[in-house]
Image: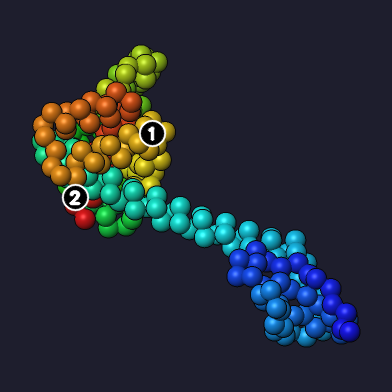
Amino acid sequence: MEQKKRMHTPFYWKMFGFRRYKNAAGEQWLTHGSKPHRYLVRQVKGPGMPRWAKWTVTGVILLGIGTAGYQIGMNMLADRLMKELSEKVISKEEIEELRRDPAIMALLESELKEGNKGVLPVEAGHSTEAQGGITPDRSRSRDAEEAGSGGVRPVVADGVEATGTGKDGPKDNKSATAEPAASKKELTLLTKEEALQLLLKRFSIGELRGFMAMAEGGISDEEKETVKSSLKSKLSAEEYEALKLLALMEISK
């Protein structure tokens, strides 16, 4: 009588009534039903992959699939969220106000052309573009030359000019640098993914889905104000401004 040894059978084979065996010759068999029918699986010529290695490979594959699925889901959520914010929540008046600022438009134009992202300090009401055919770097060097020849000193701190001129030199640099740079602001550009991460730190996923559900079938003025007040209450002024800049960039694409 043939000697056979019962082996580990995967659960998905057990679901269909199969059991796995191995005989003395190293052949593996599947049996099925109350009156077993034998099905030769394969001839074992050497040791197979250890079980821990199989579980490791399976885990890595599942982890990769899960990570890819998560990234795809987050990208879709970011696209949808920014679409609703730019089209239905942030008002046209706010967008037009941003468009009237030449510094913002210069920064967005650079972003759309080059795909750069970052922080650019600019002076309020001044364009970042070259004026009169002189680039900012060249204008600074010209100011420095004028300062060396007794002309007006260049800007020394955050848009504040030194108080002294010519041979007398600066009268009080400390008082000049201590003045608040009210005319200077910082423009921060975010990607959609960064904006989503920022909102997820301030709101739950349920709250964000609620905002998007409000905006889906058309949003009333009252609902729009509710969403905007929620955003302003949990975001700083700079963060809310960054969201508006991103909305303007999405509309401009």
Residue depicted at x 32% and y 18%: 180
Residue type, numbered disc 1: Ser
| Number of dots carrying numbers | 2
- Residue 49, percent across and down? 76, 71
For residue 32, side relative to residue 194 (left or right) = right
What colour scheme does the image use?
A: rainbow
- Which mark identifies residue 251? 2
- Which residue type does callout 2 highlight? Ile
Disc 1 is placed on an element classified as loop
The residue lying toward the viewer, choosing from 149 and 59, is 59
Please say if 49 is above or below 62.
below
Considering the numbered disc 2 on the image, is that residue within a helix, a strand or a loop? helix
Q: Is residue 186 visible?
A: no
Front residue of 20/218: it is 20
Task: Say whether residue 2 is left or right of residue 236.
Answer: right
Nearer to me, 54 or 33: 33
| Residue 74 image position (x, y, % from top left) | 40, 50
Q: Who comes first in sequence, dot 1 or dot 2?
A: 1
Tell me which residue sits at (61%, 66%) in the image. Answer: 15
Q: Mark 1: give few (<14), some (14-19) or many (20+) Cα within 10 Å.
A: few
| Residue 209 percent coordinates (x, y) | 30, 40
**In this figure, which residue is indicated by the disc labeled 1?**
204
* Viewport quadrant of the C terminus: bottom left
